Amino acid sequence: TVYWLDNKLYLNITNKCSNHCLFCIRNFQAGVGSFILKLPEEPSIDRVITDLEAVSNTKNWTEAVFCGFGEPTERLDCLLEITRWLRRRYGKSLYIRVNTNGQGQLLNPGRQVAKELKTAGVDKLSISINAHNESLYDEVCRPKLKNAYKAVLEFIELAKQELETEITAVIIPEVDIQKVEKLAQEKGVNLRKRRFNQPYTQF
């Protein structure tokens, strides 16, 4: 549930995801480096906090990132509670980021996801979009929910009103990165390009 790179803590709170992306790392390996991220079961909030406590004093952590083998907003209440714990433990010295597919509103109807994340203490959202239109999004991200691409675009608008927000795209042949850059400009957010080094086939 907890792994790290340099001074950044990463939180793997779920293996559930509303997408089945062609390029997802979990299609090719069981984890990152020596960390196994395929979970035998969905971890309880207490389990995650216990794992955090075990490493809390081992380094001067500068950032916590909700990023693992699933979509963090699939477990919104868990995400919020752990964020609040991090804020109580570290105060403002820790930067908190959530890597998300942007479908939080679809997954949690009736809730104000971006507002709740801000209130809990999240600093930034990195929204993985990987496409400049719906047909490409459906091709490379293979969402399980209807109207997912439209929901992601709407979530970007909501998110940027509450939090520092960027969109991200993986550099693969199917994705026209220049068109995604144009989309980012239209939305008034930054684009972060992500490298993809694993071979894959469409399946």
Image (cartoon, grey):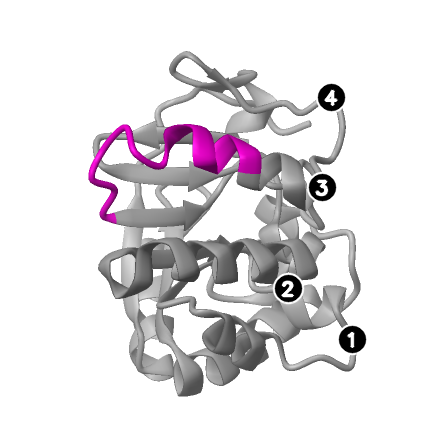
Q: Is residue 141 magenta?
A: no
Viewer-closest of 197 and 17: 17
Type of amino acid at the residue the image marks with label 3: Lys
| Residue ID at (29%, 77%) | 185
Which is closer to the viewer, label 3 or label 4?
4
Taking 154 as reference, is 107 above or below it? above
Type of amino acid at the residue the image marks with label 1: Pro
Distance CA(mark 3)–CA(mark 2): 13 Å
Q: Is residue 59 magenta?
A: yes
Distance CA(mark 2)–CA(mark 4): 24 Å
Say whether disc 3 or disc 2 marks the residue closer to the N-terminus: 3
Which is closer to the viewer, label 2 or label 4?
4
| Residue ID at (67%, 25%) | 39
Say whether disc 3 or disc 1 marks the residue closer to the N-terminus: 3
Image location (x, y in percent) of residue 69: 58, 34
- Quick one: label 1, few (<14), some, or many (20+) residues within 10 Å? few
State the SS at label 3: loop
Describe residue 40's horizontal placement relative to residue 122 as left or right: right
Distance CA(mark 3)–CA(mark 4): 12 Å
Report the magenta residues as a range: 50-62
Distance CA(mark 3)–CA(mark 1): 17 Å
Type of amino acid at the residue the image marks with label 4: Pro
Image location (x, y in percent) of residue 193: 29, 50
Q: Which mark is residue 40?
A: 4
Disc 3 vs disc 1: Cβ atoms closer than 8 Å?
no
Q: Which residue is mark 2?
A: 103
Q: Which residue is mark 3?
A: 16
Q: Which residue is mark 1?
A: 109
Say whether disc 2 or disc 1 marks the residue closer to the N-terminus: 2
Type of amino acid at the residue the image marks with label 2: Gln
Which is closer to the viewer, label 3 or label 2?
3
- Quick one: label 4, few (<14), some, or many (20+) residues within 10 Å? few
